[in-house]
Amino acid sequence: MIALLGNLSRDLQPGTPPRTGGGPFHGARALQRLRVPARIYARAAEADRAALFPPLISLGTPARFVEGESTATFSFSYDGDVRTMQVEGLGDVWRPSDLPELPSTRWVHVAPLSRHEFPTETIAALARTHRVLLDGQGLVRVPATGPLRLDDDYDREILKYVWVLKLAVEEAEVVGDPTALGVREVLLTQGSLGSTVYYGGRSEFIPAHALDVDPTGAGDAFSTAYIVARNAGFSPPGAARRATAVVASVLSE
């Protein structure tokens, strides 16, 4: 069993209706193809439940809505792999008391949309009994409305409790050398080029094939597919190769 925790988002693009986004939704897109035991815990304002939660439920993985007070909202566009994002609203903070019971769960994918959502004490509570994959957005994204900003003003102690850290290229530029972070496994996703896995003092590049599609959610799908493969006994490079294939399937739908 694996679990995925995170806030849903309301994603706004010019000329289209608002869409459901966030790690729980895009991770569920990967789980729809993998068909393994999993559970998703997705949070948003109760007022947005009717709009944002049904698209997640329709993907088939058991999911529980966690009532919140606010909904993360973003407006964005892509130019190839380059994303321009505006933060319109911030999501809720997950405190240790907000964490669900996760029996028979070894791996947990924590999918923050901003640095404030999963503080160190919450990740530490999860790490007592689970292996945690943390998305690097939870380190470097500044929790403020306006143009999306990244900086390195995060609590370094949080990394002690992270088993896998997933970083996009722009996040890696902020946190620095992946091998110096003290995390067991670091995944550096490089868009259509592929990814690099750092583990046990080694690194391996995993190539991908470029696809002429909207890449929104690729990182969340990659992270979810990666921990599913690791839970099944794959090595870190093997899990990254498996995740790369799953992402290609998700983006091609």
Image (cartoon, rainbow, N blue to C red):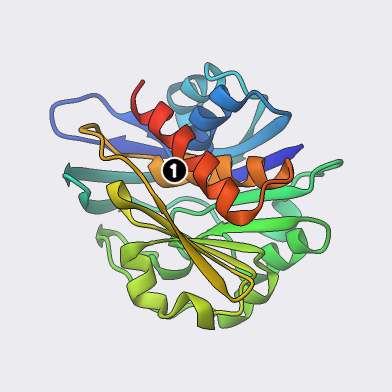
Q: Which residue does the image show at 53% across and 16% down from the upper left?
A: 58
- Crowding at dot 1, Cα within 10 Å, few <14 / some 14-19 / many 20+, comes out as many
- Pick the front one: 41 or 209: 209
Q: Quadrant of the C terminus?
A: top left
Residue at 69%, 70% (x, y): give it: 161
- In front of the other: 182 or 236: 236
Badge count:
1
Quadrant of residue 101 in the image? top right
Residue that carries the numbered disc 1 in the rendered image: 71
Furthest residue in direction right, as rendered:
103
**In the image: residue 136, left or right of residue 4:** left
Q: Position of residue 245 (x, y in %)?
A: 46, 35
Q: Answer yes or no: is residue 23 visible.
A: no
Residue at the image point whose x is 24% and y is 32% from the top: 213
| Residue 106 x, y percent position in the rendering | 78, 48
Asked if residue 236 is positioned above or below residue 80 in the image, the reply reads below
